[in-house]
Image (cartoon, grey):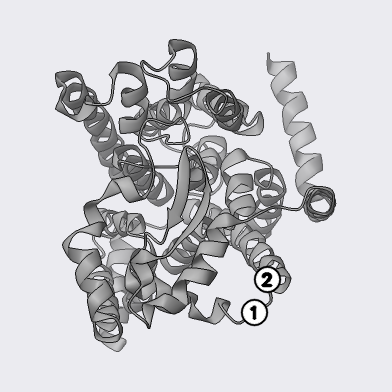
Amino acid sequence: MKAFSARCRTVGGWLVRRAGWCLAASLALYALTLALHPPHPLDLRVYREASPHVLSGGLYDYAVHTGPPIPVLPFTYPPFAALLFLPLAPLPWAVLVGLWQALSVAALLVVTACALRLLAPDSGPRTRELAMLWAAAALWLEPVRHTLDQGQINLLLAALVLGGLTLTRAAAGRGAAVGLAASVKLTPAVAGLYLLATRQWRAALWALATGAATVLVGWWVAPGASVRYWTGLVTDTRRVGPAWTVRNQSLRGALTRLIGPDVTGAALWWAVLALVTVAAVCALVRCARREDRLGLLVTVELYALLVCPISWSHHWVWCVPAMIWLAHGPGRRRPLDRAVLAVWALVTVTRLVPRLVSVEDRLSRPTPYPALLAWPGTVYAVCAVLTFLALAAGSAPDEDEIPAPEPMRRRARSDKDSSVSA
């Protein structure tokens, strides 16, 4: 086993030294894949075609018609998001698709670089090399590929959150990044818990103020759409899609496929939710004690994906920071961390969820849902819970690991000082 580990470290070192070439090769192969199998980014089409309707009052009446199990794709984001998407409308479709692909791939590199920097701010050139290597590999993980194929905004929002929290020194900038991301898609608002857990009080207030300001702007420009969204549509998950499909990798989706459509009224749902919440809280407490900022952010983001009613597999791009933590974090040499990393890699590289989707689509509405599909369909939820266990069990860093991050209390003081200067 020691010889195998030494061999792996040797191979890993060789790859890190050639990270730029690995990234270039990965991008070239991805470009070839696009040329041979051009994507049909339906979500990007919704952003582009629905956004002009925010000015005419028909934003939430517009929908792209597709096929079962989701026959129509309506616009499901707040009105302010439609305002941000307005510049997409006049662009030629081919230009827009190419530009969105390029921005999303660049965002992936930001995600890997900022995750590593959040884990170890002072690691120097090695962080850049590792970021390129991780981006080269992450390009082929299922949530990332699905995001790129659908023209989704997940990578851009993850880059905005991580970049704001990592690269911005002022509390106003960190909070505004979180608030702006939440104004497009509500789930990034969970990063506010990270700000609270790291005692960045002023940044948390800036996040709240930014989110409120975007709501007011949306209300001023599109009052009718804002009333419809914030008084009803915001909680109507039926517009997003059916909870039972294996495309939905949330905890509710997994349990719906296992025990039936009325899962939220069952005692088992509340018991499982309580256990998952306890695991997440334990992970948060342990990460806070060892001042593990990446671990804290991964915990809150994975928990949000679990408890949301709908978490499509492409929402799970936060598996990339999670895998980075498992590979380079405080417990990277422990068998548990290595095992969880291997499970994430197996599930995402083999594209297990799309394979299950292809089987599901050949069935009529399955009632009851086949157990042979239901149990494998819990994979992302299982990976998230296993990650919580690894985060909760993490130990202090070894000497050979990436240097430990700066203390949170120092960041909290700079939060206060920079906010005053801002």
Pointer 1 local density, CA inside 10 Å: few below 14, some 14–19, many at least 20:
few
Which label number is shown at residue 45?
Answer: none
Query: Can I make out residue 196 in this image?
Result: no
Q: Residue at x 18, y 22 (%)?
A: 271
Q: Give me the residue at 62% from left, 61% from top.
A: 104
* Position of residue 67 measured from the top left corner of the image (x, y, whole percent): 53, 43
Label 1 secondary element: loop
- Could you tell me which quadrant the N terminus lies in? top right
Give the secondary structure at mark 2. helix
Q: What residue type is labelled 2?
A: Trp
Q: Residue at horizontal 34%, vertical 37%?
A: 306
- Which residue occupies the foreground of this view, 38 or 11? 38
Relative to 385, is 99 on the left or the right? Answer: right
Residue 93, disc: 2
Residue 293 point in image, percent of width and height: 39, 51
How far apart marks 1 and 2 lie (CA) works out to 6 Å
User: Mark 1 near mark 2, Cβ–Cβ under 8 Å?
Assistant: yes
Residue denoted by label 1: 91
